Structure formats: structure tokens, C-alpha cells
Amino acid sequence: MIYQKTARTVVADYLALTKPPIMLLLLITALGGMLLAEEGMPSASLVALVMVGGALAAGGASAINHYLDRDIDERMSRTRRRPIPSHRTSPREAWVFGVILNVGAFVVFAAGVNLLSAILALSGTLFYVFVYTIWLKRSTTQNIVLGGAAGAVPPLVGWAAVTGDVGLPALYLFAIIFFWTPPHFWALAILIKDDYARAGVPMLPVVRGLTETGRAIFLYSLVLVALTLMFFTVRAVGWFYLSTALALGIPFVYLAWRLMQGGGVRRARHLYLYSLLYLALLFGGIMVDSAVSF
């Protein structure tokens, strides 16, 4: 019984290293890129390969992030229960696990899909690890703006898996996630502002305060929603997508505007939670629009 319990704990800790909620959202955006490229549902085998490869890449990048951010995680109440700071997993184990997952992802994509998708997936990990985690996160208030490019890679991977190239619609999907990332993470940063300050991470609310952060969130939200509507003009998506983008975008801008007016943590929480739903439903709208003619 003791062994069984220990085995379950080890599995749970390794799973936690992969950050499953983030992984799921990234896989949804990769699938959206696939359906958009296919103008329908790709073959089940291709979808399975991209989902497996994408899960390995996202999980591997997250595990390496756990390893690199272990000093920060120990100082933040939100993260100190993670496997490494709570000493349930050693830093070396997390590092090796992350590298193995990324090697596996590259093999799955290169052997089962195509080389471009493998290179894109690996580039996302490298950007996340070296540019965002090691450099930007600890050095600038614009860390999440530039670093958000890593999280915008999965739609490119999904598109490339189907077409073997990167087209304009895929770049739109990349840009949508790129501009969604700052409002999403800055809203979260407001919620855990004291944690970031304690850890010495120069997030925008810590360095510039809530007023400037609120203005920045609102401006990025306007650009984001405008971009989602402009996407319709390239004729890669139809009226169902446009109506979905409009229906989701209006509340997003409204919540960002309310946060800019004040309200602090309470309104930041509303925007943060809605932003998660927003991105999932927006890409759900892309998938429905791609699979069904309206």
C-alpha cells in the first residue's frame, strides 16, 4: 500500500511539472490551426500525432521552466507547493524529464508529421526557455509581451502539420494569441502582485502600478479584438467565426475597460478568468467555422 501511494505521488508530481491546464489550452490552439488549414477535420492519425507531439513539447517546456524558476517558486506562495520547491522532485529530475519530453516531441513531429512542424515546436520551447524564462522574465516589465510569442507557436505547428508551410491565416492565429497574452497575464499579475514583488520579478503591476497596468491591458484588449475581426477579411474564416469573435470580444473589452476604471483585484480576477474562456471559445469558433459551411 505504501508503494502504491508513493507511485501515485510520483506520477502526480511529474504530471504537475507539465502544467496540464496550460498544455490543454495550447493543444486547443494547435487543433484550431489544423482545422483551419484543412478546412475541415484532418485525419485522425494526424490529429493524434500533433496532439501527442504538442503535449510532449508543451509539457517538456513547462518542466524545464520549473527547473529554471525554482528559486522564484520558493518565494511565491502561489508556487511554493510545486514539486521542486516542496522537495518532492529534484531539480535534476525535472530538467532531465523536460529534455526527454522535448526530444520525444521532436521525434514525433519529424518522423510522423513533417520537419517544419518539428522545428516550429522546438523553436517554441527554446524561445520560452532561453528568451522568456532566462532573460526577459527577470529583466523587464515587457517580459510577457515579448515572451508571449512562445505560447503563440502551437497554431503555427498545427497549420504546418497539415500544409507543410506557414500561411497568412496561421500568422493571424499567432498574432491573436500574441496580443491576448499581455491582458491575460497582467490580470493574473495584479492578483498575485505581492508574490511577484517578493520574488523580485519585474511584472508591470509591481514596477508601474495598477493604473498604468490597467491602461496597458485595455489598449492590448482593443488591439486583440480588432485583430480578431480583421482576420475575417482574409477569407480564411466565415460568418460564424466573425459573430463568435464579436460576441466574445465585446465582453473582453468591457471587462478591460472596467479594470482600467479601478476595482483592483476583484475586476482583475473577472478579466483573468474570462480571458481563459475567451481564447478557448474563440478557437472553438474557428474549429466549428472550419468544419461546417455557413
Image (spheres, grey):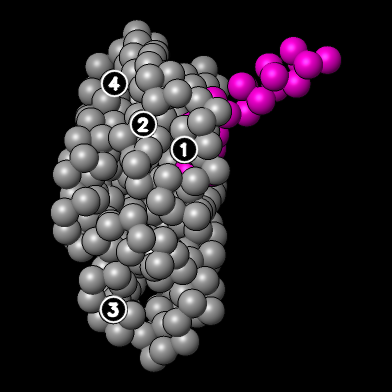
42 or 81: nearer the viewer: 81
N-term-proximal mark, 4 vs 3: 4
Label number found at residue 209: 3
C-alpha distance separating marks 2 and 1: 10 Å
Left or right for 163, reference 250: left
Mark 3 or 1, closer to the camera? 1
Determine which of the numbered discs, if any, sits on residue 118 in the image: 4
Quick check: can you spot residue 57? no
Magenta span dominant secondary structure: helix
Image vertical order of residue 234 relative to residue 86, above or below = below
Badge 2 is on which residue?
67
Q: Position of residue 117 (x, y in %)?
A: 29, 24
- State which region is magenta: 1-22
Could you tell which of marks 2 and 4 lies nearer the N-terminus?
2
Identify which amino acid the numbered label 2 is placed on. Answer: Tyr
The residue sitting at 34% across, 26% down in the picture is 161
Distance CA(mark 4)–CA(mark 3): 40 Å
Disc 4, disc 1: CB below 8 Å?
Answer: no
Res 129 quadrant in image = top left
Q: Nearer the viewer, mark 4 or mark 3?
A: 3
Whichever of labels 4 and 1 marks the residue nearer the N terminus, that label is 1
Label 4 sits on a secondary structure element that is helix
Secondary structure state at the residue bearing disc 1: loop
- Residue 26, percent from left and from top: 44, 41
Q: How far is mark 2 from mark 3, CA to CA?
A: 29 Å
Identify residue type, mark 3: Gly
